[in-house]
Amino acid sequence: MLRLIFSLSALAAGLVSSSAFAMPSADGARPARPAERGALMLAQDGNIDIYYDARGNRVLVDADTGKVIAIQPPGSRLDRRALRRQMRMQELGRAPAEDDDRYYLDNPDDMARFRRRQLEENGRVIPPPVDEYDDNSVDAYPPAPNNDEGYATTYPEAPKSDTIKRQPLNEASIDPEQPGQGEVLQTNPDAEPSLPPNTGGKATVDPSLSLGVRQDVAALQVLLDRGGASPGVIDGRFGSNVDKALAAYNEINGTNLKSTDAVGIQAALAQSGGDAFASYTITPEDAAGPYVASIPEDYSQKAKLDCMCYTSVTEALAERFHMDETYLRSINKGVDFNRPGTMIKVANFGKLVSTPVTRIIADKTKKEVYAYDGSGKLVAAYPATIGSADTPSPTGIHAVSRIALDPNYTYNPNINFKQGQNDKILTVPPGPNGPVGSVWIALDKPTYGIHGTPDPSKIGKTESHGCVRLTNWDARELAKLVSPGVTVEFVGGSTIADVGGTSTDEFTQQ
């Protein structure tokens, strides 16, 4: 009986306790706040879970009660910042005002709207671009204001051409902090005088590798140029000039490098000056020139120009860094070469050969010039255009008589070829685009010499008027290695004696 009474008492006490907990206390009572228009109804502490259904809708679920709060279609759902802002407004007991614009410093869109609002308040409205991703034209952006309150551009004015001294080709510096850049490895100093390297007249490169422009081929060309074996223009293409330069490189450096040995090429680059390419910043002097609009074909028109200068910044920079102009543009797409301060990618060809030359062989069959030092060691090799069937080069052994840098050119129809209706003697001013380029190394045989060219990409692939034609940078390097009296021996090919006549390359030094 006592046990029954005790159980009933405990039950009654439990019922009284549960009723007390269910009754809201006067101290903790909080009046319910009606949902504001457009606000989300969140229970408990405002904790929500976000889910996505099969249609891409975002479903907001109260984390405490499990009830669905809202369903937001993909095209209308709020972003996180907007949702956070709306929840903050709910906590403060007010809805966000339509004109209450807030900006987040880490949001580019917010800062753009903030800037636009400031300009609107100042009475200056910037229309948005048509398409900020696809339209990069000048018309897509507004002109900058020129008053003191705006953001005017402050590009420095290019200096006048008469205050600029052109930087010599061999002094161009792209990375002065790389020691030993472009040094030629001297091996077998006691070797006996040797003939030009024999390539067998056959290309050693897999034909499948000779298609198109490739950066690894350009890297090989840079290495060859560093080693004293010029490939002509650095253009990323295999060809006969690369084959000849590779054979000469192996003889100069005592190696057996192959064009397919990628590991060996990279190792040789690392030892001779680092990466094949480097960065160069265009200077105001580069942009200033002087430049000419174009080079006329007629010699009488050439004679009227002040100089046979470069026609563009790209032409000047391509020649300075031993590159094909088209290839220079292709590896610097979208770059404004006319703007000082622009950084571009160029060939890191290294230092020039500095060993004095005492003997030169001009091989007309191979279209190559070989330079030897006093011990008979090959120290440099250059692709060349040497004469033609109609106007062949000399034969036998001759000697350097004089050297001229930046010479003018004398057109004499009585000695040279006759061009068009030009029957008078004309003097074409000096410049890299002149008929003999920027260098003339005269031989003891009148009207014949070794000189530069206005078309470096054609060296070794076309014909000359009897002289030995090199790229301007190769001719300038050779001019600093030779002196009057150095022998020049012509071997192979047809000779001037076979057809009779004289060279049509004549010059007078300015």
Image: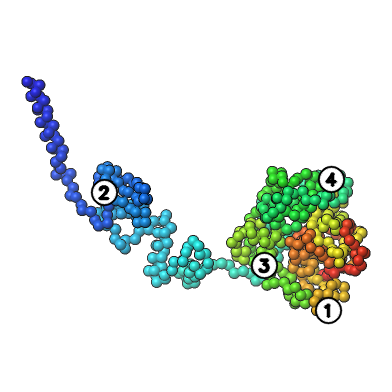
* Element type where label 3 sits in the image: loop
Q: CA distance from mark 3 to mark 4?
A: 44 Å
Which mark lies nearer to you, 3 or 4? 3
* Residue type of the residue flagged with mark 2: Leu
Check whether the beta carbons of the residues at disc 2 and disc 1 lie within 8 A of each other: no
Task: Identify the disc placed on residue 423.
Answer: 1
Q: CA distance from mark 2 to mark 4?
A: 90 Å
Q: CA distance from mark 1 to mark 4?
A: 54 Å
Q: Earlier in the sequence, mark 1 or mark 4?
A: 4
How packed is label 1: few (under 14 Cα within 10 Å), some, or many (20 or more)? few
Quadrant that contains the C terminus? bottom right
* Element type where label 1 sits in the image: loop
* Element type where label 2 sits in the image: loop
Task: Identify the disc placed on residue 312.
Answer: 3
* Residue type of the residue flagged with mark 3: Ser
Q: Residue at x 49, y 70 (%)?
A: 143
Quadrant that contains the N terminus? top left
* Residue type of the residue flagged with mark 1: Asp
How packed is label 4: few (under 14 Cα within 10 Å), some, or many (20 or more)? few
